[in-house]
Amino acid sequence: MYEIKKLDDLMIFLINLIGEKFPLSAILKGGMSLRLLNSPRCTNDLDYIFIQVLPDLNVLEDRLTKISSTPRNKNPKQMTLYQLLEKLQKSLNTLSSDSINELSDYLPSDNLLGLELKMKVNLLKMVDEIKDCIIS
């Protein structure tokens, strides 16, 4: 058992314990992560975010078949993962520079140049790779 005499001892113990119990999902953030990187920032708490480990494709497909449609987007009442990918692919093919311009409030203008093509290429590539995983 660890000997805990100071706050630092407790924090080290908790960081280690959470890292052992949640190795794929616990992410230390905030001041403590900076402190571990030798930042002079002083902090008295541990901030974590927990991410969900991605489910396998069978689980994801099962969940997608249960998604109800809404009149606004006119989706079928049930959708397979493959159908979702097809819809995403069609949407990406209609992506325009007007869609990208909506990001101008968030991105510097020099980052917008060519972003439409980069997004299309990378997202279409991702769709193809997921389709390949489903088929094989």
Image (cartoon, rainbow, N blue to C red):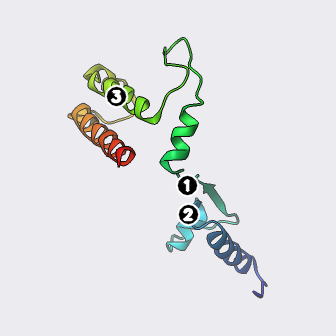
Question: Dot 3: what SS?
Answer: helix
Q: Quadrant of residue 99?
A: top left
Question: In this figure, which residue is indicated by the disc labeled 1?
Answer: 53
Name the mark on residue 7: none
Q: Amino acid at mark 3?
A: Ser
Disc 1 versus disc 2: distance between alpha carbons? 7 Å
Question: Which residue occupies the foreground of this view, 69 or 53?
Answer: 69
Foreground disc of the pair 3, 2? 2
Whether residues under marks 1 and 2 lie with C-beta atoms below 8 angstroms apart, the answer is yes
Outermost residue to the front? 136
Question: In this figure, which residue is indicated by the disc labeled 3?
Answer: 104
Q: Quadrant of residue 111?
A: top left
Question: Dot 2: what SS?
Answer: loop
At 24% across and 38% down in the image, what residue appears?
121
Q: Amino acid at mark 2?
A: Leu
Quadrant location of the N terminus in the rendered image: bottom right
Question: In this figure, which residue is indicated by the disc labeled 2?
Answer: 24
Asked if 75 appears above or below 23 in the picture, the reply is above
Question: Dot 1: what SS?
Answer: loop
